[in-house]
Amino acid sequence: MLLARLRWSAFGLRGRIVGAVLATTAISLGVAALVLLPRLETSLRSASEKTLTKEITGATGTLRSISRVPYWLIPEIANTTSKSELGRRARAAQQALKDDIARLGDAFGAPGGVTLVGDVDAFGNGHVVSVGGIAPALGPTGDVQKAFIRDSQKLSFGTLANTPVVRAAIPLAQFHKNSDAVVVVRKSIDEIAGAVSEVRRAFEIGALVAILLTILIAIPLAGTLVSRLQRLRQAALQLAIGGTVGSFPADRARDEVGDLARSFSIMQRRLRQQEEARRAFVATASHELRTPLASLEGMLELLADDLQGEQPDLEDAAALLDRARVQSRRLARLAADLLDLSRIDAEVSLRSEPLELGELSRAVLAEFELPSAARGVTIALLDDGKPSWAMADPGSVARIVRILLDNGLRVAPEGSEITVLVRSGSEPTLVVSDDGPGVAPEERALIFERFKRGRETGGEAGFGLGLAIGRELAQRMGGSLVLTDTEGPGATFTLRLQPTEAPASDRLASAAGV
């Protein structure tokens, strides 16, 4: 029964895959046609407009020549004798205008598409100046009016006798201030529609071929994919029903389904590891919490006994109170460490901004003046005299420095020195060194694990979380925190971060000597 259901579901999935592929192909081709063809037409129209603009720029000389032709004499040809001075000038003007317009038509690739509109009034209305006896058609002349009124050439698109054209209106006042004429260009672009039509036909043929190929490829591919998924599902059902499975189907294909089959075994192993880690974490955290809580509870009971007696033992009560405060601070540190770990595990995003390591280190060192003085330990900040700028989260870097200084104070002997060295250069670096007992070779990797501590702790109680938090924070910021090999006693930890340039305000202040 189960196998029959699996076969039917596999067949349904095969049909859905093929249908989805076909639908996706058809929709993609349709969207491509709707997007590309109008864009193609728009691009061709824009290209024709740019070409005409360049042609107009190249024909400046001819336009300037037309602006000087006394076109208003041309109508006088019919009213004068052939030998009169006025007739001679009128015919000369007509010939000059005819030659210039012919040259413009050749320059624009629009023979017969160039016209002169003269006697244009303040509203942009004028009449066509005929140089061949028949006035050419212009169609709508709104561009002429706008060009004349604005005293700038106007390019647009329109139709003339049902033919698409690119239009230009060029006021001649740009070339001769007394001119009241406008050169009008009507250039056919019907080849654009033909080109778009050819592309559309080619696209339709290509789309038909693509759909046929999709059918031929999708059906066998879907069948193979469904068969592999069916075998994988059967193994997963056996695992869900029986709790175990001998082995997942061997799938050597280097694709998503093959990766899925291999991921099941990896998932099982990692889930088991995570469960073990969770149990260990809970057990260790419970143990670490239980110890200071039990100690704190016992101290409070003793403190109550001391204070409730007829003669309170204030000296012993004060000692118990100090010890209780130590345990309280220990619990607070553990709570802070656990909170940091929860944020790291939740992958809470960190800030990323330029920070100067020397300035940040001085601020953190100021927090340790009293604790270091109480232990008789000196903390010194060293640098190479240059700002060390890094791209990191200021709070996280400060947390790492506090962890390293706190660890150093725990193990540093009285009268020793802890050094904080800040280096600039291609890799901003912060190095913290102490004169304590150091770290044994077999514990070098161990100390960076959660709840793991080295043997040499300076007699101070801890939880083994600080260095684990420090390393994970450094890695989250694209850097690293390592234990560096050094000669002599003590331990040296090196924090490396991503470099960055100083902010502009700091560069200006440095250049000004502030």
Image: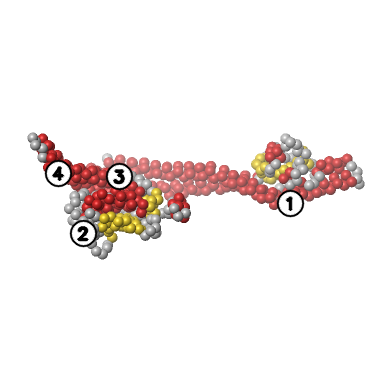
Residue found 36% across the figure and 48% down from its top: 393
Above or below for 499 versus 345:
below
Labelled pair 3, 4 in contact (Cβ < 8 Å): no
Residue found 71% across the figure and 40% down from its top: 148
Q: Nearer the viewer, mark 3 or mark 4?
A: 4
Residue on which the image places disc 4: 319
Tell me the distance, in whole angstroms, between the alpha carbons under discs 3 and 1. 74 Å
Whichever of labels 2 and 3 marks the residue nearer the N terminus, that label is: 3
- Taking the image as shown, residue 172 lies to the left or right of residue 397, namely right
Tell me the distance, in whole angstroms, between the alpha carbons under discs 1 and 4. 105 Å
Whichever of labels 3 and 4 marks the residue nearer the N terminus, that label is: 4
What's the mark number on residue 343?
3
Coloring applied to the structure: secondary structure
Tell me the distance, in whole angstroms, between the alpha carbons under discs 2 and 1. 92 Å
Tell me the distance, in whole angstroms, between the alpha carbons under discs 2 and 3. 32 Å
Tell me the distance, in whole angstroms, between the alpha carbons under discs 4 and 2. 30 Å
Q: Which residue ends up furthest to the bottom in the rendered image?
A: 487
Q: Nearer the viewer, mark 2 or mark 3?
A: 2
Labelled pair 4, 2 in contact (Cβ < 8 Å): no
Labelled pair 3, 1 in contact (Cβ < 8 Å): no
User: What's the amino acid at mark 1?
Assistant: Gly
Q: Secondary structure at mark 4?
A: helix
Q: Which residue ends up furthest to the left in the rendered image?
A: 310
Residue on which the image places disc 1: 61
User: What's the amino acid at mark 3?
Assistant: Arg
Residue found 33% across the figure and 44% down from its top: 348
